[in-house]
Amino acid sequence: MKLQRQGVLLAASLVLFTAASGRAEELGSDGMETGAMEVSGVQTQEAESSGNSIFGPDYYSSDLGKALTNGGEGYTLQGFIDKDEDPYLSFGGWVQLGYTSRSTGMFNDIPNRINNNQSWFWIEKTADGSEGLDWGFRFDGMYGTDAGDTQAFGNNPGNWDYENGFDRGGGYGFAIPQLYAELAYEDFSLIGGHFYTLLGYEVVTAPDNFFYSHAFTMYNSEAFTHTGVLLSYSGLDMFDFYAGWTAGWDTGFDQFGGGSNFLGGVSVTPIDEVSVTYILTAGNLGAIGDGYSHSIVVDTTPLEEWVPGLNYVLQSDYLDVNEDVLGSGNAGYSTIGINQYLLYQIFDEIGVGARFEWWKPNGVSYYEATVGTRLTPIPNLIIRPELRWQWSPAANDNPARNVAGLPVDEGVIFGMDMILTF
């Protein structure tokens, strides 16, 4: 019955919101790598380019443009160190500084000061199976105020990067969100180790999201990372398949309470303008208990021929577990949500977007609306100012009904960050 109700809501939302507002397509940053996300092809999503530069068509080929932007390609740490056109190892990272006027209760929860949210470094060897069996690996390490939400908090305390001396006070700490090996052969890829989830649309890595803040659903109804194995296959036209085993949600080389679950799904692109991805987890999810979850993401460029750079994305998540992880007094924990994103890339350097979300944990509805811009005056610099509202009529001034413990009905939240990639 719950799944039937979700299907009705999903269909109704598609009809109603096609004529309304609300999308926030996640931008894959130029030159960035995202590891398991790139292997899966699910989470690294790029908005369609508008095909126009605010500086004019000849800017990147001019002397000034070349000097500031490296001919539009941007400057990278690898470009300074390794001049090989086909390097054996790839590496890079970014530094993110941000400010929020109020806590969102998720990631951006230290207001009224400038925070180093993420200082990130990654290194990898890409596994290329196009000419036979090949191997690779990936490592990601970070420092910042996002560390507490990026560590393997589904672990037993004291294991990997969770409650193991990685926290440094003032909200800062270290995390190792990815460390895995990969084998690739033709259209197959197998990764094993600690890697990002396939669930959902928004991601932990700051440059790959349109907005500075995050959706309720991403933070509360999806895993961030897993430890296990994941097989992907991309040998059929229009389809990508995923299947694997993990030791529960948000684990780092550890297994909490016998965590053991399936992770997999399928992505289909029936036409160039539409892709649909369905990802599920089922089994013992570890620290949050036994259960089932799925995420459905519909990514479209509905007016690509007439309005290049316009994207609309619809996401619906469902989670049902038998543990009371939020302390609401109920026997279990169940959430359902619908996120809608609308982004318009006016110029290659300027994008505007909106996100509207309805999220319902254990029968209490929460709402969130965010509008913002994404500015990339040069390829290595991303600036994301935004205004956010989050409210819940049932939870307002009623702590007993605030099952998620989130700040609600406190007015507008202003946030802004700056990301320098290298």
Image (spheres, grey):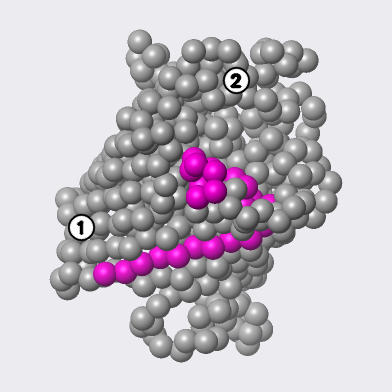
Give the crowd class for mark 2: few <14, some 14-19, many >=20 residues within 10 Å: few
- Depth check: 59 or 268 in front? 268
Position of residue 360 measured from the top left corner of the image (x, y, whole percent)? 55, 20
Q: CA distance from mark 1 to mark 2?
A: 42 Å
Q: Please state which of the two labelled residues, at mark 1 or mark 2, is closer to the viewer.
A: 2
Query: How many marks overall?
Result: 2
The residue shown at (47%, 16%) is: 332
Q: Label 2, secondary structure: give it.
A: loop
The residue shown at (76%, 23%) is: 409
Determine if the magenta segment contains residue 142: yes
Magenta-highlighted residues: 135-159
Tell me if residue 361 comes above or below residue 153 in the rendering: above
Mark 1 vs 2, N-terminal side: 1
Question: Which quadrant is home to the N terminus?
Answer: top left
* Label 1 sits on residue: 188
Determine if the magenta segment contains residue 64: no
Give the crowd class for mark 1: few <14, some 14-19, many >=20 residues within 10 Å: some
Q: Label 1, secondary structure: give it.
A: strand
The residue shown at (36%, 67%) is: 137
Q: Is residue 128 visible?
A: yes
Q: Amino acid at mark 1?
A: Phe
- Depth check: 415 or 66 in front? 415
The residue shown at (46%, 89%) is: 83
Position of residue 383 measured from the top left corner of the image (x, y, whole percent)? 68, 58
Q: Is residue 349 visible?
A: no
Q: Is residue 164 left or right of residue 201?
A: right
* Label 2 sits on residue: 327
Q: Amino acid at mark 2?
A: Gly
